[in-house]
Amino acid sequence: MESAFLDFKKSNKSLFPHFFHLSGIHPELPGYEVLSVLESESLKYQFLRKSAQCLVLNCSVKGAYLAAERAAYCKRAVKIHYSDEEQAKTESELAEIITREIDLESLMSNYKSFLVRAYRVGKAYNQYNTMDLEVSIGKKIWDELDGKCKVDTKNPDIIFALLMTENEVLFGEEIFAREKGSFESRRPDRRPYFKPGTLEPRFARMMVNLSKASTKNFLLDPFCGPGGIILEGTLMKCSIIGLDIDKRMVHGSIKNLTHYTPDAQFHVFISDARKLPFHNNVPSIATDPPYGRSTSTYGKEIEDLLDQFFSEAANALIRGGTLAIGMLDEIQLDDIAKKYGFNLNVFEKIYIHKSLTRRVGVFEKK
């Protein structure tokens, strides 16, 4: 859901404090993802602070909206009107403190309805009940405006969001909130072509974002398989090139892309990732090479395959180009990448399930 107040022409240049409410799937990757989106589209920001499941930046409203809308592991972006380490005794006292700091008359001058939502990270500020906070803040807003604005739970003109983190309370107007289940229709088992071991759509989208894929350039996946990563790229309006050595994967990718994004720009064809047909002209690579019992490397040991691939990627990427890659935790990706002149930007473990822990690496060509 996006806020009705958005006017990108007016808000693109000015920087305002925003908080991004992040998924708890990993302590670092969701934050990296938000920053990568902003950098991919050359949108200015200033890092302010980060805590568990919360990133606070100065950025434009346009930047906040785009980052939250694109980032798979961002729940919402909120323009901050109040933040403090407040320890009021009751929900009504906290509501009083928050609303006292905000010029509600000015903020609500163009709106007729509103809604308040409260969230907490873990057990933060557990002395407060979130539902009671919503009611208390809503009542204070109603009182301050003499009943000129009504509460609307279905289609409010503006949504106020409060987030209680481990060390502060943040409150402001919601710019974007991801709807629950927004990735469900693209689950691997619901696609026209299915192959076991395929990335879940949220993880695939994160990989695209970590590669700093831009709507102005093209994204390459040289191990595209049934198209999980490139499908997310097309949905983000990127131009796409997908390669795979297996013609069944190529046909499957095309089938999936045509089903979900029939009007998108994409090119998928048979090719060996160890012999990439590119030279210093690829800005972004996002990929998840084959590994495990259910995938095939055509008889090539995975370490040798990756060594040859990184050599080709170094040749294909432009200077400053980004490679985002997922791999088994036990594979020493960082050593291979350094061998071919890559700078290491991100190198994080992420638990997938009891028999699989992935290592996500983001590398920049020197």
Image (tube, rainbow, N blue to C red):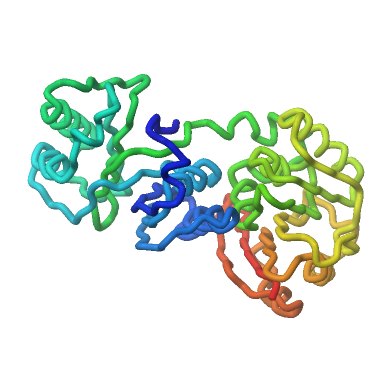
- Residue at point 85% right, 44% down? 268
On screen, residue 305 above or below 92: below
Res 46 quadrant in image: bottom left
On screen, residue 211 above or below 363: above
On screen, residue 82 above or below 106: below
- Residue at point 90% right, 57% down? 272
Task: Point out residue 347 in the picture as x, y percentages from the top left corner.
Answer: 58, 67
* Residue in front for this viewpoint, 334 or 291: 334
Quadrant of the frame with the N terminus: top left
Figure disc tally? 0
* Residue in front for this viewpoint, 40 or 195: 40
Res 234 quadrant in image: top right
Left-right relation of 15 to 251 = left
Left-right relation of 204 to 150 = right
Task: Point out residue 62 in the picture as x, y percentages from the top left corner.
Answer: 47, 45
Task: Point out residue 235 in the picture as x, y percentages from the top left corner.
Answer: 66, 38
Whether residue 180 is visible, yes or no, is yes
Whether residue 197 is visible, yes or no, is no
On screen, residue 132 above or below 62: above
Left-right relation of 351 to 171 = right
* Residue in front for this viewpoint, 333 or 170: 170
- Residue at point 58% right, 53% down? 41
Q: Residue furthest front?
A: 10
Quadrant of the frame with the C terminus: bottom right
Task: Point out residue 175 in the picture as x, y percentages from the top left corner.
Answer: 40, 39
